[in-house]
Image: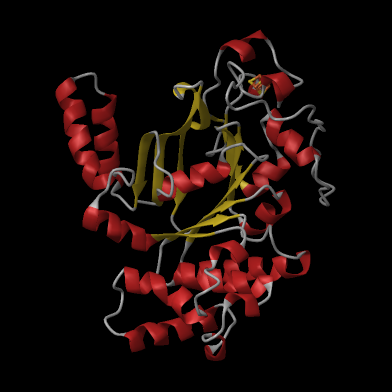
Amino acid sequence: NDNILDIRNLKKYYPVKGGVMRRHIADVKAVDDVSFQIKRGECLGMVGESGCGKTTLGKAILRLHDATAGRVYLDQDAEKIEELEALFASDKPEAVAQAEAMRKMMDLTRLKGRAMKEARRKINIVFQDPSNSLNPRLLIKDIVGEPMIIQHVYSSAAEVEERVVELLGTVGLSREHMRRYPHEFSGGQRQRIAVARALATNPKFILMDEPTSALDVSVQAQILNLLKRLQDEFQLTYLFVTHHLLVVKYITQRIAVMYLGKMMELSQTPELFKTPLHPYTKALLSAIPIPDPETKIEKIILSGDVPNPLNPPSGCRFHPRCPYAKEICKERIPELEDAGGGHLVACHRWRELN
Ligand code: SF4
């Protein structure tokens, strides 16, 4: 299977309770029916304004949040996935029952016990702010070594320690840093330690959750270069969540654009910057200076804030801010469709507008 992750119809809703009885009154649809694949060895960027659901989506994939619905296939056989999805699509109750049984062995959102533990080894996360993600009371050797101990990767403390030294070397630190605490390091060094920790169990997939946003501009490039080098060296796959478009332009091969819990566009990175198809993507790109004189993107200035996710707009969620909205946009949710060569777009009017 060329895809390391295959995400189908993923939803993450947060219930909102109110009144004296704390009754369920509504759901915040942070991620609403999102499907896409992440290719083995690629860096896929996930962009959008704050509150668009990009971080929630990443965390639901990793099962740091329980998904409300949908399936996440990690490193599974492509034919088996299609077989299982066909069973889910069936209207026969026995087929759906069979799908539910198969799902317990294949769907990351349903794995338990040993299968889940094995899956955990393959996936990891680097958080935005290393000051919060590293335990200030632990020595660096314990912070980096902890995942290996939890996952029983090595049988002796000496082996764990040797691997910690190796990992620190990989991220540009050394043995002498092992017996220090996080506060003794700069922000950039702390993020290097977080990356070493994320690599400890030899994962295949790492969710990069705004990994450079909390750092000084001067060290952001160093960390990006480090992440790029490690990706090549260890054949890693990244989902790179950020609101910073120039960062994704530099580091990703493809980009997905999210808006209010929905995926609006997904394309190869150079193509997205050169010929974006969705009005929201054009609006995001209009806000950044693009040094390439060849690129002529129509300027769309975003007006207003992102609407309240508790009560998202009907039809296309972007319609209240879209200069091209028509009646159909308020009535029908646009499907994500292939505009050619895997460039996906969810807009009723993309053909006439491009
Ligand atoms: Fe704009 Fe309509 Fe396209 Fe949504 S579907 S982006 S409102 S033109």
Q: As displayed, is residue 135 above or below residue 165?
A: above
In terms of depth relative to the viewer, which is nearer, 276 or 310?
310
Q: Is residue 119 left or right of residue 330?
A: left
Instruction: Determine which quarter of the picture holds residue 43.
Output: bottom right
- Report if residue 33 is visible in the image: no
Residue 149 falls left or right of residue 139: left
In the displayed structure, 174 sits above or below 45; it is: below
Q: Position of residue 173 (x, y in %)?
A: 58, 83
Residue at (71, 64) in percent of width and height: 215
Q: Residue furthest bottom?
A: 176
Q: Position of residue 170 (x, y in %)?
A: 53, 80
Q: Residue at x 58, y 27 (%)?
A: 346
Q: Where is residue 71, by image quadrant?
A: top left
Q: Position of residue 202 (x, y in %)?
A: 40, 70
Q: Is residue 259 left or right of residue 60?
A: right
- Quarter of the picture containing the C terminus is top right
